[in-house]
Image (cartoon, rainbow, N blue to C red):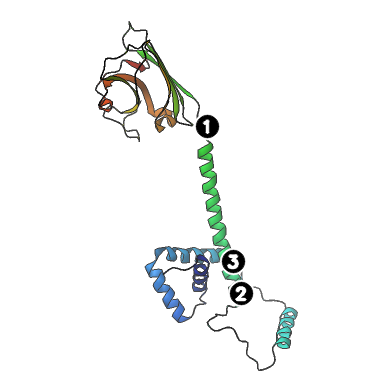
Amino acid sequence: MSMPSEELQLLVAGYVLGDLSPEEAAEFEHLVAENPAIAAEVTQMQRALEAAYAPPEVAPPEHLRSAILNQVQAEVPNGTPMVRPAGQRKLPWRSLLEVAAAVIIIALGVNNYRLWQAVKTARIETQKYATLSYALAATRGNSDASAIVEVDPNILKARLEVKNLPPLSPGKVYALWTVLKPNAPFTTDEKSAILTEVFQVDEQGNFSQVIAVPRAFRSQELVTKVAITVEDAREPQKHRGSPIMITGL
């Protein structure tokens, strides 16, 4: 069974206020039993009304009560019943005010939650991360190769600059790896590494390009090393090579 949210809220309010007919109450209870979400709305409405109507009722001044009764008697002839359209339930004024108050309280709660979520999302989206720089040195002491990885975690891009690496034979490629702490919450290989880029150097042994980097760079403390290995071009993800360049030497 589906109905507009406004109609459902009025039904919930009527049930909480005890203003439904026995037939309506029985039908509504059947609906609640089949739909836990509606049961949650009933609980929320009950709490809202309890919080909103803690103060006791105050009787109106006698002169105001008399004036209202006199006005009603002047507008409705004696003996004439007040008629409402068939199928329309009459709610006492106090009940109508309670229904309206409850709906407003719930609406404000929903709007406040949505506002909080929007602020939270905006903070995450506008958070600024500092640029990270990783200098890689050759693992062989007699090599003059060098590499720099300048990472912008805000856009998850990096400038990879490599110099003086020897060109590789056919079927081989250089692989750049992001090495994380063990058990970091990212998908890594058995060496705790993420394949970040595969590249070849030119005849002078150089390579320069903007590359995509893993989201792990937004948690800098998880990145322990950045390394370069030589891998089989057909399956560089196998990570069989040992580092020829690495950070922290």
Which callout, 1 or 3, points to the residue nearer the camera? 1
Which callout, 1 or 3, points at the residue further toward the start of the chain? Answer: 3
Disc 3: which residue: 101
Q: Position of residue 50 (x, y in %)?
A: 54, 66
Disc 2: which residue: 94
Occupied quadrant, residue 207 = top left
Distance CA(mark 2)–CA(mark 1):
53 Å
In the rendered image, the vertical position of residue 9 relative to residue 63, given as above or below: above
Q: Residue 226, labelled with which disc?
A: none
Q: Residue at x 53, y 67 (%)?
A: 6
Q: Position of residue 15 (x, y in %)?
A: 49, 73
Which callout, 2 or 1, points at the residue further toward the start of the chain? Answer: 2
Q: Residue 128, labelled with which disc?
A: 1
SS for dot 3: helix
Three-letter amino acid code at the position of disc 3: Ala
Q: Split into 4 quadrants, where in the image is the N terminus?
A: bottom left
